[in-house]
Every structure is written in structure tokens, then in C-alpha cells.
Image (cartoon, rainbow, N blue to C red):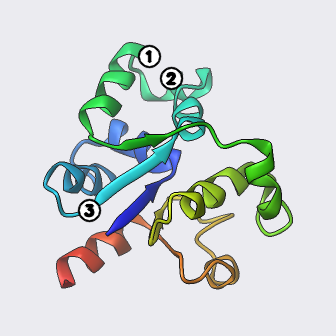
Amino acid sequence: MKVYFDASVIIAALLSPAGGSAQVLRFIKAGLIIGITSQTVIEEVLEEDHLQKIKKSRQEIVGFIAKSDLIIRRRITSDEIAPYEDMVNIDDAHIVAGAGLTRCEYLVTLDKKHLLRPDIQEKFLPLRIVSPKELLEEIVSN
């Protein structure tokens, strides 16, 4: 099962090591899922406002990501994002593009406002846009 990770899930895992987002990341190491993200997402995690929220150094966050076994695709280009710009919030287009470009079956996110909405979820089928909780339930049921 190939799963594309949004910045919100990585940030939540850093903030709450016992939470669902952290558990989903641990499933990568356990070999239950293949976790993928992009350099674009990593750069979002490392933005200054997120560093202040997470209260960890850039080096600690980079170390956490390196130990997670996430596969990191190169930066998503504007040409790769363009087909998605009119389909989803412009700031989130790179996430859906990344999931598509890496041929992931799932996109895991905590973004209820822009991505975890039935209209958006239906628009990108067969890609399944899910929360960490929904992904955990899916993994446990299989």
C-alpha cells in the first residue's frame, strides 16, 4: 500500500508521538505501508512558523524525517502542479499532484478544510484521501 504524506501529518507526528499520525509513520518502518512525500512537503514542514509551533530545531526535524523511512520525491514543479490548480485549493495542489505522480493509492492528511471533503475526495478517485485515523482503520481491517 503506497501512501502519500501531507505536511500536516508529519507535523502532528512531531507534536504527538503517541497519536495516530505518529502511528501511521511507524507503519512505514514496520513494512505495513510504503510512505512517500516530496521535497515540497518537507520544505513546508521546515517553514519558520512550523518550526516555532513544533518547538524542535530544524536539525531535529530533519533527523526525525530521515529516521521515518519516508521516500522523498524531488520537488514538485509548477508544470506538474498546473493540472491540479483548478481542482483544489492552490496551496494544496502540490499535495494531490505529488500523490498522483508517485502513483500512491492513499493521500493521508489532516486538512479538513481543503482535502478531507467528499467533493474533493470524489474528484480524485481512485486516489483515496483519508485522515490518519481512517488509514489506521483500513490497515487494521486488512
Q: Nearer the viewer, residue 93 or 135?
A: 93
* Image depth: mark 3 or mark 1 in front: 3
Give x and y (percent) for residue 97: 65, 58
Q: Give how far across and how far down residue 40 sits, in percent.
A: 60, 37
> In the orientation shown, which residue stands out farthest toward the right?
86
Label 3 neighbourhood size at 10 Å, few (<14), some (14-19), many (20+)? some
Q: Would you name the residue on which mark 1 appears? A: 58
Q: Which residue is the site of mark 3?
A: 33
How would you rate the neighbour count of disc 2 (Cα within 10 Å): few for under 14, some for 14-19, many for 20 or more? some
The quarter of the picture where the C terminus appears is bottom left
Asked if residue 70 lies left or right of residue 76, the reply is left
x%, y% of residue 112?
59, 65
Comparing labels 3 and 2, the label whose residue is closer to the camera:
3
Q: Earlier in the sequence, mark 3 or mark 2?
A: 3
In the shown orientation, is residue 33 left or right of residue 50? left
79 over 34 or under it: above or below: above
Q: Residue at x 37, y 74 (%)?
A: 134
The amino acid marked with disc number 3 is: Ile
Q: Is residue 23 above or below residue 136?
A: above
**Residue holding disc 2:** 51
- Image side of residue 49 versus residue 10, left or right: right
User: Do the numbered discs 2 and 1 sit on residues whose CB atoms are within 8 Å?
Assistant: yes
Q: Is residue 75 above or below residue 122?
A: above
Q: Where is residue 111 drawn, in percent x and y? A: 58, 59
- Whether tag 3 and tag 2 are in contact, CB under 8 A, the answer is no
Marks 3/1: CA–CA distance:
26 Å
Q: Residue at x 51, y 51 (%)?
A: 6
Three-letter code, disc 1: Arg
Position above or below: 95 against 44: below
The residue lying at 27 percent from left, 39 percent from top is 68
